[in-house]
Amino acid sequence: MGRFQIGTLEQVLQADWTEVFTKAKEIGFDGVELGVQGDDYRDTELWTEGGIDALAKRQEESLPIFAVCLHTFWKFTFADPDVANRTTAKQILLHTIKACGELGVEAILVPVTNPNKLPEAESFKRWTEEMKACAGEAEKHNVRVALENVGRSHIVTGEQLLEQIESIGSSHVGAYFDVGNAQMLGSHSVNDIKTLGDKIFKVHIKDPKKDRTPCYVGEGDIDLDGCLKALAEIDYSGSLVFETPGLDDPTDTARKNLKTMRDLIKKAGLA
């Protein structure tokens, strides 16, 4: 096993939770990441009767779940003046922590969203308070909550993400660093990796062009070689999870992207 394992979000393969394990394994991925969307979170197997057992069986028969991504935080967010919305967000996260603990899933991706455009200081404060209220459960179930750098947030740079993490003060709260998002937001992916250091729990891989035209990994404008070397420099040895466009054929695109990524890892001397 090399330094990095490579996984994929189910949306990359345009597959649902019942299909993605098999498809990802056939292509050659090492694991999967499952996304929980908007209002539909209660329809996923993390909530439905027998769902946890079904997911556990798929892990046993196929590939591990590297993480669960709570896309729901674009609708239910901690940066909301409405206490009901914040409470729903908290309930979703706490339930997911418990479910991931049962499944042995290491991490939960939580995008640090501020869709209501609250002032930065207020958004920061609400995220700190609500995450502190959830950190104990993450520690109890030995699940790590990884905050992702995304658009429409009070966070842009690695320094800002580090400040948010440190304000929460839990060893089970860190970063899910997205190398593409960092650069698209106007930060510097390689520098941000070095800034965040061992606070990085998981990594998303995408390689967009500056004009955001969809393309293959290796054809965009992200310094993937520099990012890989920076990850090695901070002694990161976790998973790299694709959040890449499917282009004309999601399966063929994923297969090509996976080969490119493994070639880049090998070229960097990190295989």
Image (spheres, rainbow, N blue to C red):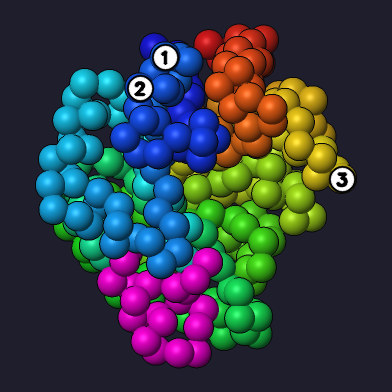
Residue found at the very far front of the displayed protein: 248
Q: In front here: 234 or 38?
A: 38
Marks 1 and 2 in Cβ contact (< 8 Å): yes
Q: Which mark is residue 211?
A: 3
Q: Amino acid at mark 2?
A: Thr
Position of residue 241 in the picture relative to residue 115 (left or right)? left
Q: In front here: 69 or 129?
A: 69
Q: Which residue is mark 1?
A: 26
Please tell me how crowded label 3 is: few (under 14), some (14-19), or many (20+) other residues with Cα within 10 Å. Answer: few
**Closer mark to the observer between disc 1 and disc 3:** 1
**Where, by quadrant of the figure, is residue 134 drawn?**
bottom left
* Magenta portion: prevailing SS class: helix
User: Please, what secondary structure does the residue beneath circle 3 have?
Assistant: loop
Q: Which mark is residue 22?
A: 2
Q: Amino acid at mark 3?
A: Asp
Residue 83 vs 102, above or below: the answer is below
Please tell me how crowded label 2 is: few (under 14), some (14-19), or many (20+) other residues with Cα within 10 Å. Answer: some
Residue 132's x, y, as percent? Answer: 34, 72
Label 3 vs 2, first from the N-terminus: 2
Would residue 203 be counted in the magenta stretch?
no
Q: Which residues, given as a range, are shown in magenta? A: 74-93
User: Please, what secondary structure does the residue beneath circle 1 have?
Assistant: helix
Residue found at the very far bottom of the displayed protein: 82
